[in-house]
Structure formats: C-alpha cells, structure tokens
C-alpha cells in the first residue's frame, strides 16, 4: 500500500517510524507491503514513488527544518493538494494541526484525497468536527474508507470499543472525559491545590495540551471529539455548531473541595443523549468514569448490556500513531492484493 503523509509533526513522525520498525511483521502477519511515497510538511514535500527512507527524511527535518530539503526527493515547490492529486497512492494520512474555524488546510486535503479517490486516515479533528456528515457521504460515494480512530482517545480504541458494544445491542447515549489536559488541570487543582495556570503550564510541558490552550480549557477539543463520536456511534448527522460548550475556566477551587466532601469530583464531561453537551459536572468518585490525571474515560449506555466503560491515555504521539496503524491494518484488509 502506497502512503502519502500530509503533516509531518508530533504524530506523523512517530507513525513513519512505527511502520518502518514494523515493516517485516506487518508483511508477515497482515500481508501488507507499506511504502511511504510522499511526505508533506509546512515548507514543501519529499516524493519518491519507489518509497522514501524515513531515517533520511528525519535527518533533513531535524537539521534543515523540512523534508523538502532532501537533495534527491525534496520538492519545495509542491503543496499538499498537488502531491495528493499528482502522486499514485492508495492511502492519505492527514495529520496537520486542528483548526476549528474553517477546518483548513486539513479539510481541503481530505476532500482532494476522497475525490481522487484514495482511502483517508485523519488524526485532525477540525475537518470532522465541521463537516463529518459530508465527508462520510463523499467517502461512501467514492467507495473508499475514511478512518479516524486517533482523533478520539489517542491510542485508546474508544471508537472500536463502541462499535463492539453496538454489535447486537443499541447504544442509547454516553458520557466521557475526552480531554486529558482539563482532566489533568482539575485533578492537580483538587488534589495538590495547584493553581489553574500552573497546572496548565505543567500540561503544556508534558506535551498533551494543544498549542492553543483555549481548545482544551474552553471545551472545544472535547466538543470536536463528541461530534465525531455522535456521528460514528449514534449515526447523528451533527457538526460542532450542534454542541453546547462550556469549559473549565469558571471552576473555582472551593467548588472542587466541596465536591470532594460530597464524595464527588468535578470533571469536564462530554455527553450525548438527546442533546450534545460539554460542561464541568460533578460525578461520584466511585464511578468507573472518575479517572484522574491526563486519563480519558467513556461510559456507554446500551439497551441490553447497560453501562460499559473504557479507560486509557487519550493523547501522545506514539499512542496516536498506533491508532493510525490500527486503521491502516483495517483498510489494508480491503485493498490487499491491489496495492
Ligand atoms: N489536547 C488533547 C488532550 C490532546 O489534552 O486530550 C489529545 O487530543
């Protein structure tokens, strides 16, 4: 399978390493022959139809700041859409930064890939939060797959877990902690009396906070994930405008201590029942959903099986790269023999 990587940052780089490292075992166990034929970063592209050497690209990225500096494969003149349209490939991995204003540039990349048509794996939440129903329709019309495991839960297979719960049963709603940064901030404020600002700086240093902290603390990252889950799990044709969003800036230290006395904790909860909402809520400390630190957790309510909870780390480059690999293996089963 020939792969185009769009965006070469904190997730795409570990992903490129992961597939280079596992090339042998992926061939043996899955029959997959993976070749990264193009990589695009913010300053250009590197293209080689016979396959790029990831170690060499990494060297140029580190030393010169762009893969386009490679003397043989470097193409500083090419933009992502040119590469998608002009390079033969079966799969485009979209890993540019999330933008919830207009979804760009990721949205154009995904449209170009699906129109080509090519399978797409995205870890970019913006295009899905703003246009998931339309993107799903285009993928299905062009008979290609649009996958996005890494957009929710990092490496934790929350979407796959839900799919399994749904098999033979009906999920009627769910509640979850979908953002590690806010969970970390609230946990630190409550347990150690650390200030909001200090806890946010810690989360930024640890690398799981978004570049724009408003995405995390004002609830937008959780809201994007909620939209993706509502479309995928509950078959609701919704976008970000359908979510009522409130972040954690208004959570006072006192209210955390009072909640604790009542055997509760304040968490930023994303919920889907009749409506979609993100807001700080008190939950019982005895609930499985009540996880601390940067963990994510989601409780699904199904008609027959009742409540089922999945817990795991919701962020991290290597973790999210593993979710791309899961999606890729699924797609590989459908294209095997043709690539
Ligand atoms: N900033 C996000 C979080 C990263 O804290 O959960 C993963 O989407």
Image: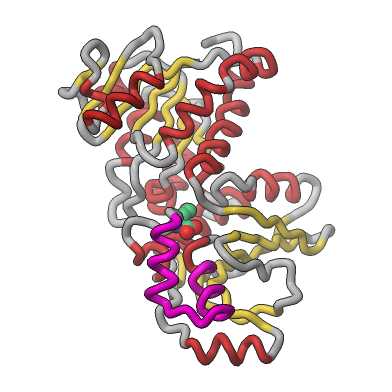
Q: Kindly give the residue lying farthest to the left in the view shown.
A: 77
Residue 248 placement (x, y as % from top left): 45, 76
Q: Kindly give the residue lying farthest to the right in the view shown.
A: 304
Q: Is residue 224 visible?
A: no
**Residue occupying the point 40% across, 48% down:** 131
Image-quadrant location for residue 263: bottom right
**Residue occupying the point 42% across, 77% down:** 196
Residue 333 placement (x, y as % from top left): 63, 21
Residue 49 placement (x, y as % from top left): 36, 10
Closer to the camera, 174 or 135? Answer: 174
Magenta stretch: includes residue 187: yes
Is residue 17 depicted above or below 53 in this figure? below
**Residue occupying the point 56% across, 31% down:** 325
Image-quadrant location for residue 301: bottom right
Say left or right for 278 vs 68: right
Is residue 55 depicted above or below 224 in this figure? above
Magenta stretch: includes residue 17: no
Closer to the camera, 5 or 89? Answer: 5
Q: Is residue 203 visible?
A: yes
Image-quadrant location for residue 192: bottom right
Is residue 60 depicted above or below 326 in this figure? above
Residue 322 placement (x, y as % from top left): 57, 36
> Magenta region, mostly helix, strand or loop?
helix
Describe the colour scheme in one phrase.
Answer: secondary structure
Is residue 166 depicted above or below 328 in this figure? below
Q: Which residues are magenta?
A: 183-206
Say left or right for 52 vs 62: right
Number of marks: 0
């Amino acid at each position: 399978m020939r792969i185009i990587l769009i965006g070469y940052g904190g997730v795409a780089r570990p992903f490129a390493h992961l597939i280079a490292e596992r090339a042998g075992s992926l061939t043996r166990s899955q029959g997959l022959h993976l070749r990264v034929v193009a990589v695009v970063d913010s300053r250009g592209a590197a293209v080689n139809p016979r396959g790029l050497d990831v170690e060499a690209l990494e060297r140029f990225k580190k030393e010169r700041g762009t893969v386009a500096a490679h003397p043989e494969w470097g193409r500083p003149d090419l933009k992502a859409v040119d590469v998608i349209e002009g390079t033969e490939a079966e799969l485009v991995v979209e890993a540019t930064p999330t933008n919830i204003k207009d979804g760009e540039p990721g949205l154009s990349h995904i449209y170009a890939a699906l129109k080509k048509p090519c399978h797409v794996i995205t870890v970019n939440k913006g295009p899905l939060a703003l246009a998931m129903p339309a993107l799903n329709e285009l993928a299905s019309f062009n008979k290609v797959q649009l996958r996005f495991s890494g957009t929710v839960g990092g490496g934790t297979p929350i979407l796959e877990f839900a799919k399994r719960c749904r098999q033979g049963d009906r999920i009627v709603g769910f509640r979850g902690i979908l953002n590690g940064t806010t969970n970390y901030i609230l946990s630190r404020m409550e347990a150690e009396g650390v200030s909001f600002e200090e806890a946010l700086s810690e989360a930024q240093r640890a690398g799981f906070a978004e570049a724009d902290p408003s995405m995390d603390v004002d609830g937008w990252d959780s809201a994007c994930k909620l939209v993706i889950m509502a479309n995928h799990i509950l078959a609701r044709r919704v976008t970000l405008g359908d979510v009522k969003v409130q972040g954690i800036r208004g959570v006072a230290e006192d209210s955390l201590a009072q909640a604790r006395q009542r055997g509760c904790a304040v968490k930023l909860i994303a919920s889907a029942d009749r409506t979609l909402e993100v807001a700080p809520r008190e939950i019982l400390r005895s609930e499985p959903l009540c996880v601390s630190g940067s963990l994510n957790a989601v409780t699904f309510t199904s008609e027959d099986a009742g409540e089922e909870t999945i817990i795991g780390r919701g962020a991290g480059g290597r973790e999210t790269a593993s979710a791309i690999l899961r999606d890729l293996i699924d797609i590989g089963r459908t294209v095997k023999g043709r690539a």
